[in-house]
Amino acid sequence: MKDTLKHQGMRNKLAKVLISKGISNAKVLAAIRTIPRHLFMDSSFEGHAYQDKAFPIAANQTISQPYTVAFQTELLELKTGQKILEIGTGSGYQTAALLSLKAVVFTIERQLELFKKTNIFFKKMGYRPKKVIFGDGYKGLPEEAPFDGIIVTAGAPEIPKALMAQLKIGGRLVIPVGFEEQIMTLLIRKSATEFEKKEFGSFRFVPLLEDKN
């Protein structure tokens, strides 16, 4: 598949849909207009790639709805060069959005099939996360902590303590919390022991799985 002027036009329409839903960050909208979402999906879904919907990918996972990607990215309030941990690489679409905003991205994926596929795709497309890790996102990445921001792209039953511990003071953790349906939650680390919590309505994600070994 190629990226054509037709695809660009479809992305511009998608950005207008997201603006109508409340997305206002100019850099986030620029990422939505730039990233060729159809290349992150199976070619059979190409005609649907710029609808504001989630779609199936490998390993019973989904590529996130563009609104969700934009919403979570906005909540991070990214600045150039900030160090971000992404839990759940998935298709790599969210990763690409973070990279478009010039973040330094460490991303973890627990599904081996997706990890291998997305790693190859990043290299082919020229996306360069700092590290792509096969592992348990519940544990975070303590050896690279602390992070300016952490973004979780799967529904967690609770906020993992390990992720809270890996935030810098002033850092932001964006995570959907819940079972069947999740509440988008933002934690801002105020001090070594204090966090400010904000909630932003209901979303639906695949579950964040913990490795019990």
Image (tube, rainbow, N blue to C red):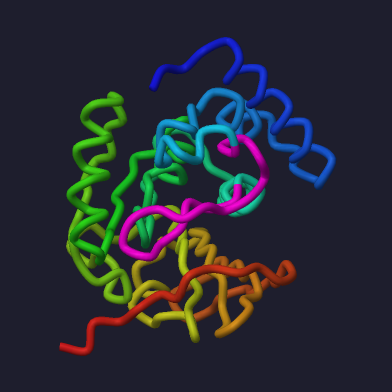
* Residue most extreme to the right: 20
Q: Position of residue 167 (x, y in %)?
A: 40, 65
Q: Nearer the viewer, residue 50 or 46?
A: 46
Residue 88 picture quarter: bottom left
Task: Say if 121 sits above or below 206 in the image.
Answer: above
Task: Say if 162 sits above or below 17 in the image.
Answer: below
Tell me where the magenta segment starts and ends, as one range: 48-65
* Residue most extreme to the top: 5
Q: Position of residue 144 (x, y in %)?
A: 22, 57
205 on left or right of 95: right
Q: Residue at x 73, y 27 (%)?
A: 13
Q: Nearer the viewer, residue 19 or 141?
A: 19
Q: Nearer the viewer, residue 190 or 185?
A: 185
Q: Quadrant of the N terminus?
A: top left
* Residue most extreme to the front: 44
Q: Does residue 58 belong to the magenta stretch?
A: yes
Q: Nearer the viewer, residue 45 or 36?
A: 45
Q: Quadrant of the C terminus?
A: bottom left
Residue 207 picture quarter: bottom left
